[in-house]
C-alpha cells in the first residue's frame, strides 16, 4: 500500500517505514504529524475521489531537522567595483511514515 501525499508544496509518494525530507515543520523530535492524501493505492484498488480520501490518514513521526545543500550566490556589477557573495542553506525536516490507514 502506498499513497501520494501533499507535503510542503510538493507531492511525495510514500509507503509505511519510508523516510523522507520535507520543508521545515513545526514540532518536536518524536512528535506525530498528519499529511493530507492526494491518492491512495491499495493493491489493485486506487482511491482518488476527494470524498473518499477524507477517510484516509497518513501519519508520520518527526526524526529531526536537517539542512539542504549550500547554495552560493554571487552579485557582480562590472566597472563599479561592486562584488557581493552570499550563501543559503534551506532548513528541512526528516520524517518517517508510520501509518496509512482508513479512519472514520
Image (tube, helix red, strand yellow):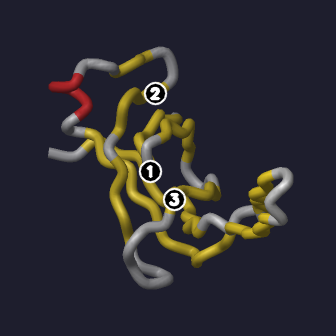
Between disc 1 and disc 2, whose residue precedes?
1
Assess disc 1: are there few (<14), some (14-19) or many (≥20) residues with their C-alpha within 10 Å of its C-alpha: some
**Picture layout, residue 90 above or below residue 50:** below
Between disc 3 and disc 1, whose residue precedes?
1
Q: Give how far across and how far down residue 48 sits, in percent.
A: 33, 20
**Picture layout, residue 48 above or below residue 95:** above
Q: Give how far across and how far down residue 19 sits, in percent.
A: 64, 58
Left or right: residue 67 versus residue 81 is left
Q: Quadrant of residue 46?
A: top left
Secondary structure state at the residue bearing disc 3: strand
- Residue at image mark 1: 8
Inter-mark Cα distance, 3 to 2: 27 Å
Between disc 3 and disc 2, whose residue precedes?
3
The quadrant of the picture occupied by the C terminus is: top left
Please give the name of the residue rendered at 39% of the width and 57% of the height, measured from the top-left corner.
59
Q: Give how far across and how far down residue 67 sits, in percent.
A: 68, 70
Left or right: residue 63 versus residue 61 is right
- Residue at image mark 3: 23
- Residue at image mark 2: 42
Amino acid at each position: 500500500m502506498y499513497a501520494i501525499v501533499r507535503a510542503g508544496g510538493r507531492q511525495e509518494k510514500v509507503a509505511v517505514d519510508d523516510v523522507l525530507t520535507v520543508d521545515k515543520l513545526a514540532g518536536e523530535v518524536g512528535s506525530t504529524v498528519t499529511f493530507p492524501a492526494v491518492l491512495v493505492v491499495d493493491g489493485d484498488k486506487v482511491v482518488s475521489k476527494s470524498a473518499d480520501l477524507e477517510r484516509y490518514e497518513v501519519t508520520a513521526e518527526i526524526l529531526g531537522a536537517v539542512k539542504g545543500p549550500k547554495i552560493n550566490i554571487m552579485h557582480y556589477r562590472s566597472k563599479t567595483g561592486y562584488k557581493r557573495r552570499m550563501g543559503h542553506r534551506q532548513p528541512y525536516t526528516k520524517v518517517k511514515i508510520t501509518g496509512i490507514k482508513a479512519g472514520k
